[in-house]
Image (spheres, rainbow, N blue to C red):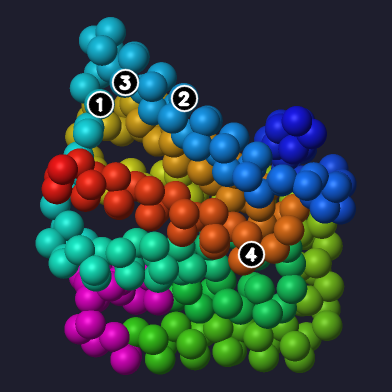
Amino acid sequence: MKFIKDLFYLVKYGKIECNNSINKHKNFIMKFVVAFFFFKILSLITIIFISKLGFFDYPLKGKIDTFNNLKIINKLIIGVLIAPILEELLFRLSLIYSKFNISITLTIFSYYIVSKFLGLNIFEFENIILRIFIAISAGYFCFKILNNSIKIDEKLKKTFSEYNRSIVYFSILLFAFSHLFNYDLTYEIILYSPLILLPQFISSIFYSYARLYKNIFYSITLHSLTNSVNLVIPLLIKFL
């Protein structure tokens, strides 16, 4: 399949070889989703197999946090709708440079930082108006600066063009390693983190591909689909 070759091209060069070939694939979305889950399952099998060999204990469960204590409907709203939108806007919207994209990414990033600074989970309601206000203000001022300074805007355009591969790699790695905090950080978890986070690396590559090949809505949809599977399957097993 051509898009498999395109995936490897993305991994090697940090960009998409051709932007319109996606439209030539009649059943592209179905093939893409099948390939995505195939690589995800393969990565999980690889991790569990290596774990069974005795190299390390694979953490089947993450740490208990606010999310785990939510009602099922709230988990689905956050996991399937809110989290994919926030994470895609944070990690992949700005893979394609524009003043608007950078400003939105900075807004989401500011919200995360302010939440962490206040010792709050991003989904908690405490001080949420303040956090949103600070985040939107940061994004607004960023847009105003870029809009009023042609020099800064052109410099950023040039930087994104020259270092697009580094930016894509950084986005993939940052997304994957951000999930490390889903676990209780032990020496073993940190040591084997590249292996433990292999499914997130795979996801990040596919999300980046969807974003660059089509648009941000495709990567959000794929991310939402992944999270829905991750949430629904354990619930089905629990109630069966």
Which is more toward the observer, 114 or 126? 126
Label whose residue precedes the other's in the sequence (4 or 2): 2
Label at residue 48: 3
**Secondary element type, mark 2:** helix
Label whose residue precedes the other's in the sequence (3 or 2): 2
Label whose residue precedes the other's in the sequence (3 or 1): 3
User: Which residues make up the magenta segment?
Assistant: 111-130
Kindly indicate whether the residue at mark 1 contacts the one at mark 3 (C-beta within 8 angstroms).
yes
Residue plotted at (65% across, 85% down) = 143
Using the image, determine if residue 224 lies above or below residue 22.
below
Amino acid type of the residue tagged 1 in the rendering: Tyr
| Whole-number angstrom distance, CA of label 4 to CA of label 2 | 26 Å
Tell me: 133 left or right of 209. Answer: left
Residue plotted at (82% across, 53% down) = 23
Kindly indicate whether the residue at mark 4 contacts the one at mark 3 (C-beta within 8 angstroms).
no
Which is more toward the observer, 111 or 31? 31
**Secondary element type, mark 4:** helix
Label whose residue precedes the other's in the sequence (4 or 1): 1
Quarter the N terminus occupies: top right
| Whole-number angstrom distance, CA of label 3 to CA of label 1 | 7 Å
Residue placed under numbered mark 4 in the picture: 216
Label at residue 42: 2
| Whole-number angstrom distance, CA of label 3 to CA of label 4 | 32 Å
Quarter the C terminus occupies: top left
Label whose residue precedes the other's in the sequence (3 or 4): 3
